[in-house]
Amino acid sequence: MRRLAPVLLVLLLAACSPRPSLQDQLTERLTALSRTAELGTVEYTVRKAIRARDEGEWFKVGNRRILFSCTAHIKAGINLSRIPLDQIVVDEGSRSVSLVLPHATVQSINLPPEEIRLEYEDVTGFRLHFSDQERQALLKQGERDIVRDIPQLGILTEAEENALEFFRPMLVQMGFENIQIRFE
Amino acid sequence: MKTPLHIPLRYLVPLTLLLAIILVLLLRPVRQKKARELEIERTAAVVEQVRRIGELSSAGYYEELVLTDKDESYLSELKRVSGLNRLTGNSDFVLICKGRVRAGFDLTKVQGSDFSVSGDTLRLTLPPVEILDVVLNPADYELFAGHRTHEETTGLLLQAKQRLRADAVRDGILDQAELSAEGQLRRLFSAMGYREVLLTFRKEYPLRSGAGR
């Protein structure tokens, strides 16, 4: 019994010690802090309607229709960490600089939940309302459509033009007179 | 020697009909599943605004979190106490969210006096670091259990965004953003020939109220 007492005491202490909740354990595992170096130069605000209809089958009496409107904020720019530093050529004598910038990329697509509005929902006959899963599937589809349409918006061209507008005055202020910037 | 199976003509018609019915019943679930899919109409995205920005995003934060909205209605309590929820299931709402936070600097706030060059020394004062975006898009969350209206779900998602922002700040995203920006800009300016790069940060540390939609 004397030998058993310390073991029991340890077990009791272990049982009483506060354990992190499942949420805390999950959060600890699933968080990540990272370094980035992105220069965002343009933001497009895009509005989109997401519409769907469900006519049902012949034995289902009634139809269902739904309409959402949403706003997406798309930011694009250049990744500063991808600037090839070995290709920066400075000539102090002629006060010239040559710089190569990476092509612009989309940096973030943000569809704020508060800017996704359910504008209209119509359910007739014996049909059920749209379920949570169906609504979310529609919104996901809307998001995918926005992402698919990005190349047609011209945002990347504009981002590169703005990057030039950003770097040029800075280099002038640094004293350079001949500035050459190109994208690769 | 076996004689070939001979079906009398009077049984052939009902047998064929029976086979046809069985075939239709077997194929029905497949047809129903296809028909049940929603018809999503193609609509064009309309560009509402184009804004020139100058955001240096130097730190990112990713978090997966579980958000639970307990149903505390009288009926739900009754179901819980009586054990009825074992049969009907409880009506708590559970969302699994995967959000991202970006932090950095709004370089449009850099004024002329914040940037100076003398010889091979460059001085730059950056505006206070801030949260640039908290992103929680429809593809970033998953409904695990329960159901709520669209407005109720939106309310929960806004709570999730607030938590993401708070967790990111608590885990040091703002310090990380300063460190990362310092390293990156120092590297860039050094490559342009500046031996001394003096970077300072304006310290305000407020969480911009309108930021991080």
Image (cartoon, coloured by chain):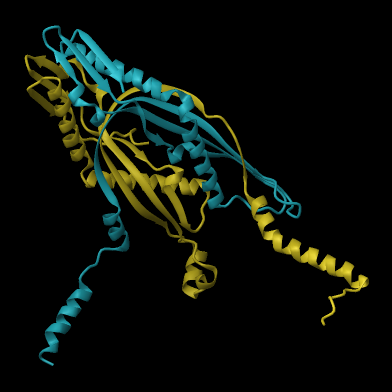
Chain colours: A cyan, B yellow
Tell me which residue sits at (30%, 43%) in the image: B165
Q: Is residue B51 visible?
A: no
Q: Is residue A169 visible?
A: yes
A109, above or below B66, in the image: above
Q: Which x, y percent locates residue B123?
A: 11, 21
Tell me which residue sits at (11%, 19%) in the image: B193
Toward the bottom, the furthest residue is A1
Q: Which x, y percent locates residue A165?
A: 30, 15
Tell me which residue sits at (12%, 28%) in the image: B200
- From the viewer's perspective, is B41 left or right of B119? right
B194, above or below A122, in the image: above
Quadrant of the frame with the C terminus of chain B: top left
B79, above or below B133, in the image: below
Along the line of sight, which residue is nearer the eye, B142 or B109? Answer: B142
Quadrant of the frame with the N terminus of chain B: bottom right
- From the viewer's perspective, is A59 left or right of A131? right
Along the line of sight, which residue is nearer the eye, A96 or A173? Answer: A96
- From the viewer's perspective, is B154 left or right of A7? right
Toward the front, the furthest residue is B1
